[in-house]
């Protein structure tokens, strides 16, 4: 079966399956709630509106643009986010039309939950079917690799490690830029023989894996492609660079490749800010009694202010004042030296030890979120003097400032917090930035509820104990960077 035909069928299956999921979820929820009665017109109208909203919002969330085999989990995250958005839009519409009380809360809740389950099932079925086709040798794109360079070899490794991509590099063209000889992939000739090689018509895609500096060779290859109907993809030799939110753009007719930028721009920036403000407001309302109790505990435990204010580096490398409940005695930085990590060796009050161990001291940071200084999910911020130290030691360290600092993050829920390996923490932060989505944020918040509050037991970082001089007069209160 042709590759394009299979891809079209998979896309059709996902679209049709998602629409059927909405219908099935709404009907099953109605049958369960009303003991087998046929759906009346009021609920049928809500179901139709939900279908339309799902179509519109799933398009806005670009649910179907990513190949299924590339990251199956991300498909569910995206459809879950768009499904949540469609439901939110439906409830807002019901509120303004003053018909919200017409519908059963049980039906609404069950429809939402069943819809998520159906969406996951649709993607699982599609993925299993796609893999079976690939095992039978169908739906696999035959690729010709031009250049056994470092980037070409990396591409070969990824294609072999991810069979669900539906790609198979069956041959390669030798060039003067080659650094290796691919194992198991035959050479079909040199670059000068490319015209004769393409005449065979054996490949669906040509992967050009040449250095960016090889502009004459790239131009030569592209000129040979003009006479053939084949998909051409460029695999630039940028493996040593940190690529953040890289993408291809059209700027007034001029193709531009973005190598590094924030993923939170335009619509995504708006979605992220709405998410932060809404969730932070709800959480602050719910935890206000706890915060009052903690404030009283801090005040009674030792003299000094309830809140501790410390300069941290956030979005765009700019500093802001981060808030925490004070857990240490005042005047701890009289020596003018501050130390990164070593939390277990810091002097704390008895009450401070409790709130630090449970991360309750960080609750005031939800006020930072409302002020716009921080996000609920994002990389943890560091103090300015440590940013200056680490940015020259850790590759990609400054890239984490492409987004707002967060109260929790992908590194924290994976155990990389406190006195742990800072390099690993940065790796997780950059993964989060590269794969940001509303669904990913909600997943991290969910994981935080179960394992994000208590310090992990991962390997202690070699950087624990680093000290730095405070350029300005010492702050009246000091706490460790966390």
Image (cartoon, grey):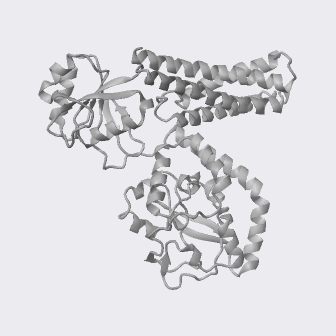
**Is residue 315 left or right of 152 when viewed as pictured?**
right
Image point 53% across, 40% down: which residue?
Answer: 268
Identity of the residue furthest to the bottom in this view: 335
**Is residue 339 left or right of 207 when viewed as pictured?**
right
Where is residue 80 shown, x and y percent of the image? 62, 34
* Vertical position of residue 360 compared to residue 158: above or below: below
Image point 61% across, 45% down: which residue?
Answer: 443
Identity of the residue furthest to the left in this view: 192
**Is residue 198 left or right of 6 when viewed as pictured?**
left
**Residue 471 visible in image:** no
Q: Name the residue nearer the viewer: 112 or 373.
A: 112
**Is residue 481 left or right of 179 when viewed as pictured?**
right
Give the quadrant of residue 36: top right
Where is residue 451 shown, x and y percent of the image? 64, 56
* Vertical position of residue 212 compared to residue 67: above or below: below
Task: Give the mark count.
Answer: 0
* Vertical position of residue 294 compared to residue 467: above or below: above
**Residue 141 visible in image:** yes
Q: Name the residue nearer the viewer: 256 or 166.
A: 166
Where is residue 302 shown, x and y percent of the image? 71, 81
Where is residue 14 shown, x and y percent of the image? 56, 22
């Amino acid at each position: 079966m042709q590759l394009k035909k299979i891809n079209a069928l998979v896309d059709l299956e996902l679209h049709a399956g998602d629409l059927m999921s909405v219908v099935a979820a709404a009907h099953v929820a109605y049958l369960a709630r009303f003991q087998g009665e046929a759906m009346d017109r009021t609920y049928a109208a809500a179901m139709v509106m939900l279908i339309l909203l799902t179509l519109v919002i799933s398009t806005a969330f670009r649910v179907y643009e990513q190949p299924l085999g590339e990251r199956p989990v991300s498909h569910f995250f995206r459809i879950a986010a768009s499904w949540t958005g469609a439901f939110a839009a439906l409830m807002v519409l019901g509120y303004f039309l003053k018909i919200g009380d017409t519908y059963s809360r049980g039906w609404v809740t069950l429809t939402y939950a069943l819809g998520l389950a159906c969406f996951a099932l649709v993607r699982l079925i599609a993925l299993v079917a796609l893999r079976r086709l690939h095992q039978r040798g169908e739906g696999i794109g035959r690729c010709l690799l031009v250049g056994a360079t470092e980037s070409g070899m990396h591409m070969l490794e990824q294609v072999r490690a991810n069979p669900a991509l539906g790609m198979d590099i069956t041959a390669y063209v030798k060039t003067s830029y080659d650094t290796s000889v691919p194992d198991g992939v035959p050479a079909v000739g040199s670059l000068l023989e490319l015209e004769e090689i393409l005449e065979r018509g054996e490949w669906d895609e040509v992967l050009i894996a040449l250095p960016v500096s090889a502009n004459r060779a790239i131009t030569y290859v592209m000129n040979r492609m003009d006479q053939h109907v084949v998909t051409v993809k460029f695999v630039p030799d940028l493996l040593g660079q940190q690529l953040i939110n890289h993408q291809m753009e059209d700027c007034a007719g001029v193709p531009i490749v973005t190598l590094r930028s924030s993923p939170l721009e335009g619509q995504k920036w708006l979605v992220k800010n709405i998410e932060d403000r809404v969730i932070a407001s709800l959480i602050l309302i719910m935890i206000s009694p706890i915060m009052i109790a903690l404030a009283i505990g801090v005040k009674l435990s030792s003299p000094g202010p309830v809140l501790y204010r410390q300069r941290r580096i956030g979005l765009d490398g700019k500093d802001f004042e981060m808030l925490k409940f004070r857990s240490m005695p005042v005047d701890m930085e009289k020596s003018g030296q501050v130390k990164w990590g070593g939390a277990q060796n810091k002097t704390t009050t008895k009450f401070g030890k409790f709130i630090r161990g449970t991360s309750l001291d960080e609750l005031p940071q939800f006020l930072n979120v409302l002020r716009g200084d921080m996000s609920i999910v994002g990389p943890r911020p560091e103090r300015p003097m440590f940013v200056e130290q680490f940015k020259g030691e850790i590759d990609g360290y400054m890239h984490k400032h492409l987004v707002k600092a967060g109260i929790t993050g992908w590194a924290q829920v994976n155990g990389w917090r406190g006195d742990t390996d800072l390099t690993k923490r940065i790796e997780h932060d950059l993964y989060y930035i590269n794969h940001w989505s509303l669904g990913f944020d909600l997943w991290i918040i969910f994981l935080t509820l179960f394992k994000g509050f208590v310090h992990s037991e991962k390997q202690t970082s070699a950087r624990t104990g680093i000290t730095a001089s405070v350029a300005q007069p010492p702050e009246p209160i000091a706490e460790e960077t966390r």
